[in-house]
Amino acid sequence: MISVTPIETEKPSELARDISERLNAAIREHLLSAFAPNNIKTLRSFPALEAADLLGVSGQFMRKVHSEGTIPEPKEIRNGRRYYSAQEIWDARQVLEQSSRTKGRYLPGRREGEKLQIWQLMNFKGGSSKSTSTIHLAHYFALHGYRVLAIDLDPQGSLTSMCGINPEIEFDGLTIYDAIRYDTPAPMADVIMPTYFPGISLAPSRLLLSEFETESAVHSNPDQPFFLRIGEALAQVEDQYDIVLMDSPPQLGFLTIAGMAAATSLIVPLTPSMLDVSSTAQFLELAGAYMGVIEEAGAQLQYDHFKFLITRDEPTDVPSQQLTSFMRALFQDRVMTATALKSTAISDATMLKQSIYEVVRSEMTRSTYDRAKESMDAVGREVEAMVHDAWGRN
Ligand SMILES: Nc1ncnc2c1ncn2[C@@H]1O[C@H](COP(=O)(O)OP(=O)(O)O)[C@@H](O)[C@H]1O
Ligand SMILES: [Mg+2]
């Protein structure tokens, strides 16, 4: 039961703490049990056609490799239909890649000489879909055979919870803060954890990460500049990943700027509303100023891609379409062609800390699901093409 005892104190510090404690207890007791009964995230299985599609082969080809015994049958077969776990799809990639004549067909990740892709999603407007876009890209890349490292740079930990870890309630392990703090930093490998989603590792976050803001103001110095901290941590593990996706906090502090200094490409998610567009203009003005400051201090900023992503796109909403056209006219191909559609399929999924890729199609209105998924796939494909371009493949 939710306790309804009135809050006695008028002292703001105690009041805030009291509210926080009650809220956390209530979340633990009510929301978590309703949304995730055993509180452990698992990933759905993928029907045969979807699995074949992810592997880039036909259903017939899959039946052939099963009957030849090249690929073991998936564990789950219901009514004569095959369902694959994401791990089984990963395993199939390894086997198929070995016998493939086209190298990289099934494991398209980076090859020798291709540099680690470090993509940051940033905008100081809260609710511009930074976290939603980051998790969808992470899932897209992992399902397509890339080794993904997700980094949560937001002390609020939305990305961390979407990766199946509840940052404030049950998690007290190391976070990205431990890898970038000034006093005896931990090895990055100790911070990174595997997730329930094959192909995705996570450098998690929780509230403590905000210490980096305070510490940087005091400890950053020419020998240990704050803007090199993330890049140096990443350098320790770079061989193990193809792409790093960094979610950012809704402000332009030391964390966001340190991310910018490590990134090889930037995406600024933007909701097409007047307020968001003007706040983004201010954000970029400030970001530009800070980029100048850290460049003077020796940072070398260079981006393969620096793009706007229109999020929560509403094709039938005239004012938002006008703003989108305005942005495209002004910035042309700096605005990504694909947009993330505004969809109840996405907001419903994120309520359950899921991406559209985790939702079972038959549990939603199909047309709604299909539109949302197609739009997220298009965003993923476009970023994937930019990644290949950065690798010099196109
Ligand atoms: N394409 C979308 N369609 C519908 N709702 C969305 C979409 N993208 C994001 N949202 C909703 O908007 C809210 C804010 O998104 P979020 O990704 O957390 O923003 P940010 O990380 O920039 O603060 C979330 O609750 C999410 O459910
Ligand atoms: Mg967020």
Image (cartoon, rainbow, N blue to C red):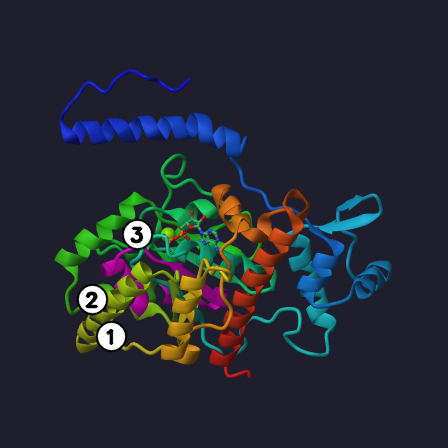
Q: In this view, does 386 lie above or below 215?
A: below
Disc 2 Cβ-to-ligand 2 distance below 8 Å? no
Q: Which residue is pictured at 33% across the width and 45% down the height?
A: 206
Foreground tag (2 vs 1): 1
Disc 2 + disc 1, Cβ < 8 Å: yes
Q: Please name the residue that numbered disc 3 is placed on.
A: 177
Q: Is mark 3 on a helix, strand or loop?
A: helix
- Residue 185, located in which quarter of the rendered image? bottom left
The relative height of residue 200 versus residue 165 in the rendered view (above or below) is below
Task: Look at mark 2 in the image and give the residue it sits on.
Answer: 225
- Amino acid at the residue labelled 3: Tyr
* Residue at image point 75% right, 46% down: 75
Residue 246: numbered disc: none
Sequence-earlier tag: 3 or 1? 3
Categorize mark 3 by other alpha carbons within 10 Å: few (<14), some (14-19), many (20+): many
Decide whether residue 237 is among the magenta residues. yes
The amino acid at mark 1 is Ala
Q: Mark 1 points at which residue?
A: 299
Q: Left or right: where does residue 378 sit relative to residue 127? A: right
